[in-house]
């Protein structure tokens, strides 16, 4: 392709993206079409001859990218939003355009340095120990898989403890890695949907007594369902007493720890042996990027280096790292560029303000719901960015119907979920562009639906 | 950020990328700097206050993205190049700008349709059976991990067979998934660095006799070292006779099968139970994208669906799929947009021509080497895109020195490797922009270094 044509098409792509961002508030938060209509527009036989690039860009923007959840929409309150920031998009774009790879130091000293720096900056923002090492993956599932494999390599195989509020992708990871069903010990939660330290300690002792080998506790800093934060400090005490690996799943919630108020809600976070966060959730990065932090130096390389015998003799030079030796990924594009670009452009201060805004949004929603107790019952209070609530007298079908009615209009995306078998509506409010009016109107429409 | 500023910065990003592409032929194929210099330019304390986005883009382009292997450089002959095409870059850019997610049908019917279509088009280009299903991951390592987990879920645990030419990330995957060391059976290769079917059959019978359970054979369609293609048809016969899963690692080489001549070199490819290719290697896509194909319908979902009980009752609607149920990834950005965009823009015909050009390039290199038998010995002939050769009388240190001298000048990136303990130089010539002059001059410089 000629340079002029590349430039023209690149500018068109930028225009499509900027136009989409400009219209976001007024366009649907979620949209879907039928398999038939989508296959008609996007499918067909394998194209043999060249086609028109402009038409292809238009079709992607108008059809493929319109019909999805818009996680960066200010009224996307379902699951966990993805409010990506433009400077982060720029960093990712640049990396794609230069076809960046961050596998080995020799083949990618520049991108590897950016990843070292981004991991260090994130660890500092979260208050993790200075010796913390990390690696970027595509998201929570693979970052957790990386952490669990590291825990097993460092500690040996054995029983893992988690709760019924632990994200279901985590037991999937454990089974995939070869954990046997009877090594997965799921604990019931307390009344606040948190891990109960007394139950955990009792389970460990009971398992020991019947010949099992407890190895790892998986705590959650911000459950997807309610934003509940497990009592990390007490759990860390138990792990220390029993020599267990403490993994903290902060995929959605741990970024709250970059603010003073969020940090205060998570005492003990820095005692994790491994921590996972998803910067594509609450750190304003486009998909995909998850981070796996491990506070034991060298543990990632001991687990994943493909020639560990070699490593015993020849240390990599100081200040260098082969990121292909820190996770199951080998060819790795640089996911650090967007973190570096957005932190450099906005500064950590604005990240903190944006996260604080998401926390405040959920508190606003809770207060608004409490103003109308005849209609709404707050089931779990605003916890970092999540509030759950019930329409007085409504059952699961009625909640699901109302969430669907509002989502089908495109005005907002809302889902219901189950807490101990009881249906609730749920808002996750971590988009800093969400206004109080967005929240009020969404709740009002749920009430009127 | 205001729309005008977003547009201006987006255009600047495009300009940096186009300028880089324009200057590619004249700029270094690989470049590195010291950890100190890179940390100086890219590191420093966590930025608290906002900074200048233009300066940040410049620093990334000038420092971070300059200091790496340039896999899309026409004289990047090391490891496996990554000659990304611009239409593919455009597709990826658009997806990033729209923050695309392809996890569930309900939340991403558009991107999921694009992935269904792209997987079908690729499978057709490769000549795979019509029932083939697939999923896109970040590359060969995770695509192979996905295939191996599926094989185990479908067949049960047991011994896996591969050769000493199998890519070392594959046994890493198996160990990670919990395969025991004595379930990994590495076979020596034949004189052409291929799996020997007679040895394979004998190993299976011997393992059976001592109580092991053979389960899977991992064949390679194009080894990284030499481009050798295992005798897939004979291996498929053995797998059929013993009820073993046949996995084919075509991460680098299987895209040759989109050409008539490449397809003829891989009889039996369509008999694989699972096949992995890396479109970011030889299908002109930017990092990252690997594809895992499985020819047994439903096997991926049976392995990865997080609520398989639910699936037993409620089938997903026809034509729909939840890609989060097809691999260990849950939050998944759309890697299919770039495949769709580039196939639609260039057409499959140009992809075939570009792959054929890479095959021809290696043949040209072999012929050029053979013209000077006093200096060069061809060790393995041109096989799909790879040729290996030795400088007459040189040892491993001398090969490594010459590869380093040429690479250090930036003119070309070349590496040496070991075949049965014997050192060779190696060119991987899959970039369709590589000229005959590029190849001649690189070989001449290796001779003169």
Image: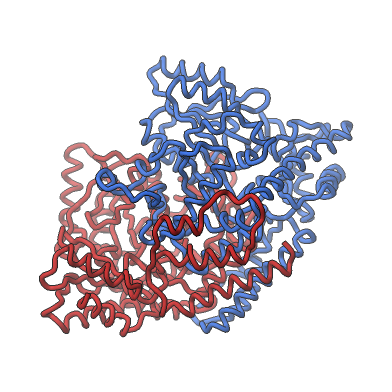
Chain colours: A red, B blue
- Residue A303: name its quadrant: top left
Q: Position of residue B421 (x, y in %)?
A: 67, 30
Q: Position of residue B1 (x, y in %)?
A: 51, 82
Q: Is residue B90 above or below residue B218?
A: below
Q: Is residue B104 above or below residue B368?
A: below
Relative depth, front residue between B158 and A259: B158
Left or right: B346, with A197 as reference point: right
For image coordinates 78% across by 58% down, the residue present is B25
Relative depth, front residue between B326 and A213: B326
Left or right: A115, with B361 as reference point: left
Residue B445 visible in image: yes
Q: Position of residue A77 (x, y in %)?
A: 32, 71
Q: How many marks?
A: 0
For image coordinates 24% across by 58% down, the residue present is A165
Q: Is residue A372 above or below residue B398?
A: below
Relative depth, front residue between A216 and A423: A423
Left or right: A122, with B25 as reference point: left
Residue A312 visible in image: no
For image coordinates 39% across by 67% down, the residue present is A31
Q: Position of residue B246 (x, y in %)?
A: 49, 30
- Residue B166: name its quadrant: top right
């Amino acid at each position: 392709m000629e340079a002029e044509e590349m430039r023209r098409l690149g500018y068109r792509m930028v225009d499509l993206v900027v136009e989409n961002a400009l219209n976001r508030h007024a366009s649907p938060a979620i949209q879907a079409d039928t398999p038939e209509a989508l296959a008609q527009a996007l499918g067909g036989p394998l194209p043999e001859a060249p086609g028109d690039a402009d038409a292809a860009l238009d079709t992607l923007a108008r059809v493929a990218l319109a019909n999805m959840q818009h996680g960066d929409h200010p009224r996307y309150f379902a699951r966990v939003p993805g409010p990506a920031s433009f400077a982060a998009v720029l960093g990712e774009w640049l990396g794609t355009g230069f076809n960046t790879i961050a596998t080995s130091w020799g083949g990618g000293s520049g991108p590897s340095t950016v990843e070292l720096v981004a991991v260090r900056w994130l660890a500092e923002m979260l208050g993790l120990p200075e010796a913390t090492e990390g690696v970027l993956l595509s998201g929570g599932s693979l970052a957790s898989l990386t952490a669990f494999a590291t825990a097993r390599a460092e500690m040996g195989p054995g029983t893992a403890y988690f709760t019924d509020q632990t994200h279901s992708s985590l037991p999937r990871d454990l089974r995939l890695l070869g954990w046997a069903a009877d090594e997965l010990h799921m604990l019931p939660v307390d009344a606040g949907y948190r891990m109960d330290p007394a139950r955990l300690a009792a389970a460990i002792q009971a398992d020991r007594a019947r010949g099992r080998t407890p190895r790892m506790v998986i705590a959650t800093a911000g459950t997807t369902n309610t934003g509940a934060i497990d009592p990390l400090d007490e759990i860390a005490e138990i792990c220390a007493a029993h020599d267990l690996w403490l993994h903290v799943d902060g995929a959605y919630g741990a970024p709250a720890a970059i603010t003073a108020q969020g940090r205060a809600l998570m005492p003990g976070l820095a005692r994790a042996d491994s921590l996972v966060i998803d910067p594509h959730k609450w750190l304003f990065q486009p998909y995909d990027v998850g981070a796996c932090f491990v506070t034991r130096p060298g543990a990632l390389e001991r687990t994943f280096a493909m020639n560990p015998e070699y490593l015993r003799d020849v240390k990599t030079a100081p200040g260098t790292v082969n990121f292909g030796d820190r996770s199951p990924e080998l060819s790795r594009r640089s996911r650090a560029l967007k973190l570096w670009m957005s932190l450099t452009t906005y500064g950590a201060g604005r990240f903190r303000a944006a996260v604080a805004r998401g926390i405040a949004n959920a508190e606003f929603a809770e207060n608004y719901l409490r103003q109308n107790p005849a209609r709404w019952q707050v089931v779990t209070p605003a916890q970092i960015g999540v509030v759950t609530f019930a329409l007085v007298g409504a059952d699961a079908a009625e909640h699901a119907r109302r969430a669907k009615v509002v989502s089908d209009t495109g005005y907002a995306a809302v889902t219901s979920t189950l807490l101990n078998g009881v249906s609730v509506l749920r808002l996750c409010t971590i988009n800093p562009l969400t206004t109080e009016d967005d929240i009020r109107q969404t709740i009002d429409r749920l009430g009127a639906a």
